[in-house]
Image (cartoon, helix red, strand yellow):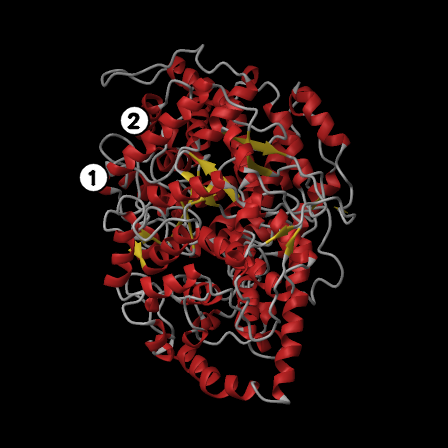
Amino acid sequence: MIDSDISNLENNINPTPVRHTNRVSVLPIRLNNYERGKLKSSSYPRQENITREIIKPTRRGDQEKRRMWELKIAEGDGPFLFSTNNFVGRQFWEFNADVGTPKEKEEIEKIRQKFKDNRKNGRQHACGDLLMRMQLMKENQIDLMDIAPIRLSDDEEVTFEAVTTAVKKAVRLNRAIQAKDGHWPAESAGPLFFTPPLLIALYISGTINTILNEEHHKEMIRYFYNHQNEDGGWGFFIEGKSTMIGSTLVYVALRILGEGKNGGDGAMERGCKWILDHGSATSIPSWGKLYLSVLGVYDWEGCNPLPPEFWIIPSTFPFHPAEMWCYCRTTYMPMSYLYGKRVQGPITPLVSSLRKEIYPIPFEHINWNKQRNNCCKEDLYHPHSFLQDVLWHSLHYITEPVLKYWPFSKLRGKSLDRVVELMRYESEETRYMTIGCIEKSLQMMCWWAENPNGDEFKYHLARVPDYLWVAEDGMTMHSFGSQVWDCVFATQAIIASNITEEYADCLKKAHFYLRESQIKQNPSGDFTRMYRHITKGAWAFSDQDHGWAVSDCTAEALMCLLLLSNMPKEIVGEKVDNDRLYEAVNFLLYLQSPISGGFAVWEPPIPKPFLQLLNPSEMFADIVVEKEHLEPSACIIVALVEFNRVHPKHRNKEIELSISNGIRYLEETQWHDGSWYGYWGICFLYGTFFALRALSAAGKTYNNNEAVCKGVKFLLSKQNEEGGWGESHLSCSTEVYTPLDGNRTNLVQTSWAMLGLMFCGQVERDITPLDKAAKLLINAQMDNGDFPQQEITGAWMRNCTLHFAQYRSIFPLWALGEYRKRVW
């Protein structure tokens, strides 16, 4: 059956993008007076009638028949959806009337209640992604209980039988939660500021009840309430302390979703109280100020300038948009459009009410100019530099007033046209997913303001389901999906098990997914004019349609293809052409810094660290220009070493030099205590795992390399009494290693530490630390072969965490597989 699934997908893959441009019959939806209100903007006319043609709304009677959420894989249809590979990798949730037995529905309610009870008792915030797991386990029909788990007592040693049993069960579990197209679906979320901007975009456009039905509302409300802190506020992310941006945006989102001021058994009142007690919404950080201005519950006068004229400055300018880090560029591009047009949605009764709820004084009495740099201390991670404040004051008091008058006003029109051109290109090149959820919501606001009935807005609405994820804690907007990222590590973990009789067809499916997810072309047209770089041969973080090439995803995917090329065809399926591997290597070499030897993530690094002084965000560090990072550098070194071994004739000398320079970068970025700072995971354990893996792959050992020796000693020094490792997310923001409270163990981080140690020969030096850790993992394994969900282990931008729900299933398997292979 699985071979049939893959064959069907292969036969329907489109070699070139197929855009559904022919209109089909759709239901026009006219907004009522409450939804429509009066559209207010300085630059577009009032609209009395708005027609929506995207999704036929669900009738209330139909909703009563529907009972369960269903995850859809590799599907897509409609006039405003198009794909480059027949939607391979696409994952979205749909509320379905025809799935689910009474027993399954009862089980779902139980796990929802269990999560809620755990949160009340102060346990973990992160979901276990149990709705997805329940569905795929049922579909894949793999018996997870026929092998009894082994439990080791305190005085028992780890045996070959015990670890083999644990590895077999873990392999079967990973097979059971693999999708039909070969990837491993999962939530990739956690920040609480992801979903509210989407709801604002849907609300101001009048499409919120068209795109979202009652079940969406219910699950989003569940999510927000589940992640409210005890003090009444909401954090920047679900494990974080309360912040103004989290609290205000979530409060506003709940009101948009229909919750009253006194809703949630007092939860709304406590949330509002936290906001007022901590300075009110006037002290929300700059991103929040912009979102609230678009909604109409903040005044544009209280925002620092984001002039769209920035996008038409000459390329000789010291700081040109092309040099911005891609996420910063694609975020502030639509922000500048919204600011340049002072876009504001309809002033509905809800908006008028919110103006009274989140401020202690009347809205019209607030001195908005004084709020431009007002930021709540709970939110302030990266204060503005003096240079940034001078620039903003100059723009606010001098430039902006001048641009209101002719002929200077013509410059604003020209610059807005350029921003629209850039946004349209970005939308089309990503199949209207954009680079991520932040830009997605911002672009939706922009295209609605540009033309509420335009096709661009409709294309964007059609891709909203790609961003919504539901689990036992409710529904949230996730980053954009981690399909490739999870697939490459799951694949390597299964291969490391070395139990071929358990593979079945999972590697064949994974191989198919990776082949079909490789980006086959560079961005269209003159992509350099659109501030884009080469992408041919690379992989994105999620799927091919997303289109944004990522270096470490490319390196790990290349590594998988190289490993799979050494395995029998009946196990892994068709092998990829060598030319595709060469293209991947070409992309990786393109991203290396000629100065430091390190590799960037998305685009070549810009050696202008002084530009970080212009960081406009109060919440993030290092966002202005692309820079080298440890993890992609380490991943690329591992892949290049293996590629050079298998394909020594392709750019051999360049690759050897690249590896040498990359090793130099790793050695120079090691911290004094022997650790490496992990930028995309928590934190020093994560970074040290990747660095030691790369150094080992390049032939560096404990005995011949000081960096390896120090890294190993760092890991051993952080092992706790029970044999595990556990690091707090506070390490990311403080840049000081911080163990979890009570020095407790996190199983994913324990797996990282084990892997780092094993790659560097710890089995031969002293196996005792590994025995203790392996025993811990074996005893922690659940009866079905999975591992418990604990704290979030992903991170980004130094100050925020990201939940990768598949990590708990992947890395313990990888660690135990390597342990079994190396010890016996």
Question: Dot 2 lies on which element?
Answer: helix
Mark 2 and mark 1 in contact? Answer it, CB < 8 Å: no
- Quadrant of the rendering where the N terminus is positioned: top right
Q: Nearer the viewer, mark 2 or mark 1?
A: 1
Residue 656: x and y, percent?
61, 49
- Quadrant of the rendering where the C terminus is positioned: top left
In the picture, the disc for residue 528 is none
For residue 743, what is the image quadrant?
Answer: top left
- 3D distance between C-alphas at marks 2 and 1: 19 Å
**Residue holding disc 1:** 742
Residue furthest toward the left? 742
Residue furthest toward the front? 33
Q: Nearer the viewer, residue 467 or 566?
A: 467
For residue 410, what is the image quadrant?
Answer: bottom right
Q: Is residue 500 left or right of residue 78?
A: left
Residue at (40% x, 18% y) in the render: 163
For residue 5, what is the image quadrant?
Answer: top right
Residue at (30% x, 39% y) in the render: 726
Residue 647: x and y, percent?
68, 39
Q: For the residue marked with disc 1, what is the amino acid? A: Gly
Residue 757: x and y, percent?
38, 36
**Residue holding disc 2:** 772
Categorize mark 1 by other alpha carbons within 10 Å: few (<14), some (14-19), many (20+). Answer: few
Is residue 192 depicted above or below 760 in this figure?
below
Is residue 519 depicted above or below 391 in this figure?
above
Can residue 793 be seen in the rendering of this structure? no
Q: For the residue marked with disc 2, what is the amino acid? A: Lys
Q: Nearer the viewer, residue 302 or 620?
A: 302
Residue 594: x and y, percent?
58, 62
Marked residue nearer the N-terminal end (2 or 1): 1
Can residue 456 be seen in the rendering of this structure? yes
Question: Dot 1 lies on which element?
Answer: helix
